[in-house]
């Protein structure tokens, strides 16, 4: 899962997009637009290419507002009078192709103005998450006065032939770039650039909104998420160099780096923590020189290939799968090289091969980018080791969220249901921003194909199906239902929930009352006993998956049935709710009958009873195969039993749910030792799985940021829509905890201390919220405002 990025040569790059987001005219949501999709002439529109579009116009006076609606295929960056305004479009599919609505008035001037757009299409090498139709640009003025910029044949366009794709080992996120500066049309976006010789664009297709009563291969929808954050950041430190002497003053922007002719140099830079950013390098001179920039999550030992402590650089080199970009200079002054899309890196290696001219590197920095989540929650406790877990976890969550949630920013950048369910809970608890969660739920809804399953990841032009992930989509909708009062949104998905459950119902083996043999990839987790075996269908799967009779898959289905029953019951669909409850009971009985091993007092992974895992026995608790009065002793046993196949970081989310359900939430701080180990190894984001791991940043491993609030502080919705709250803290070995989290009504705050005799402290609920505080079975009513609580044993 890697981040492969593309470089754009530009002279000016501001560090924050102007957040002049506006609303589209209502008529543009139902009627075909006056503007047309435009494209370059005599170009194969599905091939790799980078293009510059321009439109020059005059204004007699400055407007107070000038709103445009813009989209492109694959991607674009918009400039107005040479200044960067925004980029996009947000990722979607052909029938749900987002457009941005932006007010560009502040960038305009009286007299001559130029709107310039860089559009790129990576063709066959485009990222897996990119769904594409053909190269194109669409801009529609919001009203008659703004239609002067509508895209049509009056627009000019040229291809930027400076770019060649750089092949990579696994281009899941796209190719790197080789850029020949001599071919670059410098100054292409300036107002005074002479574009008389530029060819006019051609019209390639009509612009059809989603709600228009017209069939179209592509339909436009409004962007449902904010623009991405972009903030300048300095590189941190230089770890080693060869062929040139360079100090940290260069990285601080205080001192240029000069290289004599015929110099070869290598510089290794450590950002100190993993980041997602656009590296920006400003150079002068060095005609014919070659600069290669390589980006990596971590360094690896040159002999063993192991990552080890991420802070160590001695005897280590860049990862084999590292992405890189190549610049061939033409000797110009103050040339700025910047990615079209961001890179993911902790380490950057710069290799410079200079030739007959002096080369000056004026500056090197980067522009951090991610979904603009704000950290509106906090957690502190008597255990200082939990603070870096919070910090590293939030960094993980941030880097794995862009225009969609992503499994990881380095290797894949794909939105998987299993990962996203956990990510969404983290972002709702820590930021309170639910827009990316809503967007994800809708996109998985869009992915449902004729059999009635969601795709496992979406958007994705390759197509992958993991049936259990369709079940977790139902769980994700249930999570949203509990955390947000939005019944109309939830109601939208009930018909497709039926289809997902109906597909699974067809897979029930009538003889066993368990799920039988199922097609597609029935992935569960990544323990060492279920390794990657070269292709999806046989990787990460437990016993009983290929042949039928998997207790884990069956009980995941049971969990989805229970969630669905609650949803349908809430919407007065009593018949469906009753059927789902009845089906779940039948499956529980069948699984218990065939997979329970009386000798080991454990649930086996299949009726053959040859394989036993924490996973199956986690679900034995969550679905009450193990009776509630026996769950505490049972879950303690499976947690400590190292002979069982172990849950990795991903599935520990469900193992913790079982611990809490069994009344063992106080064990959670002990449960976090694997996360402490990652911090000790110098990771600044949490890894995909235990060492040796592939990805150093994987969203599902950020679950502690949810659990220290939901489990340790014990803040949980007590009714759908978070209309009431239950606060039941689990201190474990902590003596005091402080936490706060956003709620739709305001902030929930807890400040509690535990002693030998009980618990006391202060709880604050926002206006309009009520609930209860629970401690050792004792319940105390909570009201809005700040109140003291004290319970003695």
Image (cartoon, grey):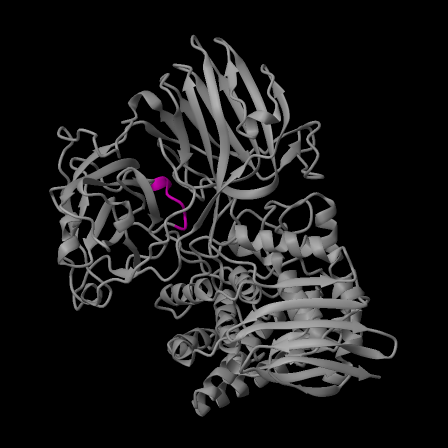
Closer to us: 12 or 212: 12
* 543 relative position to 359: left or right: right
Percent position of residue 571, x then y: 43, 87
How far from the left and from the top, in percent, is residue 299? Answer: 63, 34
Q: Which residues are magenta?
A: 124-129
Whether residue 258 is visible to the viewer of this picture, yes or no, is yes
Name the residue at 30% across, 37% down: 48
Residue at left offset 81%, top offset 68%: 735
Q: Is residue 74 left or right of residue 391?
A: left
Residue 202, quarter of picture: top left
Q: Quadrant of residue 435?
A: bottom left
Magenta stretch encompasses residue 127:
yes
Q: Is residue 645 left or right of residue 121?
A: right
Give the main secondary structure, helix, strand or loop, of the magenta stretch. loop
Residue 418 in the image: state x and y as whole percent. Answer: 53, 62
Q: Name the residue rendered at 24%, 60% in the picture.
A: 219
Q: Is residue 759 above or below residue 689?
A: below
Residue 228, given in percent of the width and then of the height, sits at 42, 51
* Residue 130 vertical position relative to residue 749 in the rendered view, above or below: above
Q: Give the side of residue 501 with respect to residue 513, left or right.
A: left
Does residue 309 sit above or below 786 in this rendering?
above
């Amino acid at each position: 899962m890697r981040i492969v990025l593309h470089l754009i040569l530009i002279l000016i790059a501001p560090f924050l997009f102007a957040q002049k987001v506006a609303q589209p005219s209502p008529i543009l949501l139902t009627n075909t637009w006056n503007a047309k999709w435009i494209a370059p002439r005599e170009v194969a529109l599905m091939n790799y290419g980078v293009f510059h579009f321009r439109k020059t116009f005059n204004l007699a006076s400055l407007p107070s507002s000038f709103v445009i609606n813009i989209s492109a295929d694959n991607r674009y960056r918009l400039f107005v009078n040479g200044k960067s305004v925004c980029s996009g479009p947000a990722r979607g599919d052909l029938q749900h192709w987002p457009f941005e609505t932006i007010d560009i008035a502040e960038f305009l001037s009286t007299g001559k103005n130029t709107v310039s757009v860089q559009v790129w299409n990576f063709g066959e090498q485009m990222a897996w998450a990119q769904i594409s139709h053909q190269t194109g640009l669409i801009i529609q003025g919001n009203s008659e006065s703004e239609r002067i910029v509508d895209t049509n044949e009056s627009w000019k366009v040229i291809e930027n032939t400076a770019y060649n794709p750089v092949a990579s080992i696994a281009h899941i996120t796209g190719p790197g770039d080789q850029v020949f500066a001599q071919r670059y049309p410098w100054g292409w976006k300036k107002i005074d650039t002479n574009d008389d010789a530029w060819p006019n664009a051609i019209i390639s297709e009509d612009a059809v909104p989603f709600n228009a009563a017209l069939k179209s291969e592509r339909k436009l929808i409004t962007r449902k998420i904010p623009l991405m954050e972009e903030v300048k950041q300095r590189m941190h430190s230089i770890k080693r160099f060869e062929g040139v002497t360079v100090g940290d003053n260069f990285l601080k922007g205080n001192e240029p780096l000069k290289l004599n002719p015929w110099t070869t140099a290598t510089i290794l830079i450590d950002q100190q923590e993993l980041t997602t950013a656009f590296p920006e390098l400003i150079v002068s001179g060095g005609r014919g020189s070659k600069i290669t920039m390589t980006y990596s999550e971590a360094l690896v030992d040159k002999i063993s290939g192991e990552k080890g402590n991420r802070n160590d650089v001695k005897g280590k080199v860049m990862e084999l799968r590292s992405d890189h970009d190549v610049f061939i200079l033409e000797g110009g002054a103050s040339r700025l090289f910047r990615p079209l899309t961001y890179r993911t890196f902790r380490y950057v290696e710069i290799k410079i091969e200079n030739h007959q001219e002096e080369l000056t590197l004026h500056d090197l920095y980067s522009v951090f980018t991610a979904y603009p989540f704000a950290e509106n929650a906090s957690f502190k406790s008597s255990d200082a080791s939990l603070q870096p877990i919070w910090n590293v976890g939030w960094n993980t969550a941030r880097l794995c969220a862009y225009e969609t949630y992503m499994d990881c920013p380095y290797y894949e950048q794909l939105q998987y249901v299993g990962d996203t369910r956990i990510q969404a809970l983290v972002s709702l608890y820590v930021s309170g921003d639910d827009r990316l969660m809503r967007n994800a739920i809708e996109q998985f809804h869009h992915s449902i194909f004729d059999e009635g399953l969601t795709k496992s990841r979406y958007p994705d032009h390759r197509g992958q199906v993991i049936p259990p992930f369709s079940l977790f989509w139902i769980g994700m909708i249930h999570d949203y239902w509990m955390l947000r009062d939005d019944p109309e949104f939830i109601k939208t998905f009930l018909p497709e929930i039926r289809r997902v459950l109906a597909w699974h119902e067809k897979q029930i083996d009538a003889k066993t009352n368990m799920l039988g043999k199922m097609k597609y990839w029935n992935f569960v987790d990544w323990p060492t006993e279920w390794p990657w075996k070269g292709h999806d269908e046989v990787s990460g799967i437990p016993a009983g998956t290929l042949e039928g009779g998997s207790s884990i898959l069956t009980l995941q289905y049971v969990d989805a049935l229970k969630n669905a029953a609650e949803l349908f019951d809430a919407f007065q669909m009593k018949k469906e709710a009753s059927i789902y409850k009845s089906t779940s009971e039948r499956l529980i009985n069948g699984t218990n009958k065939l997979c329970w091993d009386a000798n080991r007092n454990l649930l086996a992974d299949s009726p053959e009873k040859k394989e036993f895992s924490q996973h199956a026995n986690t679900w034995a608790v969550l679905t009450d195969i193990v009776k509630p009065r026996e769950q505490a002793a049972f879950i303690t046993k499976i947690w400590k039993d190292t002979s069982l196949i172990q849950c990795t970081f991903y599935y520990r989310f469900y193992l913790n749910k079982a611990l809490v359900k069994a009344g063992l939430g106080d064990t959670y701080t002990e449960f976090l030792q694997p996360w402490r180990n990652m911090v000790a190894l110098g990771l600044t984001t949490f890894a995909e799985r235990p060492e040796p791991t592939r990805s150093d940043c994987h969203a599902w491993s950020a679950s502690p940021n949810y659990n220290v609030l939901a489990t340790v502080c014990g803040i949980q919705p007590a009714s759908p829509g978070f209309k009431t709250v239950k606060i039941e803290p689990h201190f474990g070995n902590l003596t005091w905890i402080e936490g706060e989290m956003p709620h739709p009504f305001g902030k929930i705050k807890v400040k509690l201390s535990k002693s030998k005799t009980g618990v006391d402290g202060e709880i604050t609920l926002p206006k309009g919220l009520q609930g209860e505080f629970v401690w050792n079975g004792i319940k105390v009513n909570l009201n809005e405002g700040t109140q003291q609580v004290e319970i003695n044993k």
